[in-house]
Image (cartoon, rainbow, N blue to C red):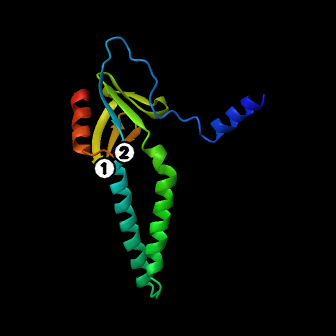
Amino acid sequence: MAQRQHHQHNAVLGMNRTFVPTLPLEDGEVELARYQADTMTFWRSQAWIALFFSILAAGILIGIGNAYWWTGVVGAMAAIGVRTLYLGPDERKDVWVLTNYRLMGPMNRSTTLSNIKAVNVIWTAVQVVTITGDKILIRYRPDPAETKAEIERAAS
């Protein structure tokens, strides 16, 4: 009984998240590519985000005449650092699988290639927009343009 309650509690907190798709392949379906976050791209992105928000926070404080503008830098660095350490391990576990029929991802999200309306590059991520309005984000790609091209080739 206690184990069942623990399992239900974890499910409520989202701790049973499936990072790798477990959907079986259909007859004739073949895996073409597998995408997982690149660790160096992840860390480089976090550094750029921290730099951007440090400059923004310092600029705002300077703009309002605060003599302690440097606290904006410290605060932004601390906030992005904590976020990176807390969310980073999970953000780097997500796996997306491209097949000759569909794109499958974390928590068994799936869309057919014929449902893909557009594929966009947003910094180090690839955004897949479906005809039905879903948006899929494949994050921290070392070469997002190549990932975009692979998905577009498969979808055409």
Q: Residue at x 38, y 33 (%)?
A: 96
Residue 22 rendering spot, x and y as whole percentages: 46, 24
Mark 1: few, some, or many residues within 10 Å (few <14, many ≥20)?
Answer: many
Residue at the limit of the structure toward the right, as seen here = 1
Residue 72 rendering spot, x and y as whole percentages: 46, 75
**Picture quadrant where residue 64 is located:** bottom left
**Picture quadrant where residue 95 is located:** top left
Q: Residue at x 32, y 16 (%)?
A: 29
Q: Residue at x 36, y 61 (%)?
A: 47
Q: Which mark is residue 124?
A: 1
Q: Residue at x 58, y 34 (%)?
A: 16
Residue 65 lies left or right of residue 27; in this view the side is right
**Is disc 1 in contact with disc 2, using a CB cutoff of under 8 Å?**
yes
- Reply above or below: 107 against 69: above
Q: Is 41 or 63 nearer to us in this picture?
A: 41
> Is residue 98 in view?
yes
Mark 2: few, some, or many residues within 10 Å (few <14, many ≥20)?
Answer: many
- SS of the residue at dot 2? loop
Q: Looking at the picture, which amino acid does disc 1 mark?
A: Thr
- Reply above or below: 80 against 92: below
Q: Which mark is residue 148?
A: none
What residue does disc 2 label? 139
Specify which label sits upstream in the sequence, 1 or 2: 1
Q: CA distance from mark 1 to mark 2?
A: 6 Å
- Reply above or below: 24 against 134: above
Q: Looking at the picture, which amino acid does disc 2 mark?
A: Arg
Where the N terminus falls, by quadrant? Answer: top right
Q: Is 65 or 8 nearer to us in this picture?
A: 8
Residue 101 rendering spot, x and y as whole percentages: 32, 21
Residue 35 lies left or right of residue 93; in this view the side is left
- SS of the residue at dot 1? loop
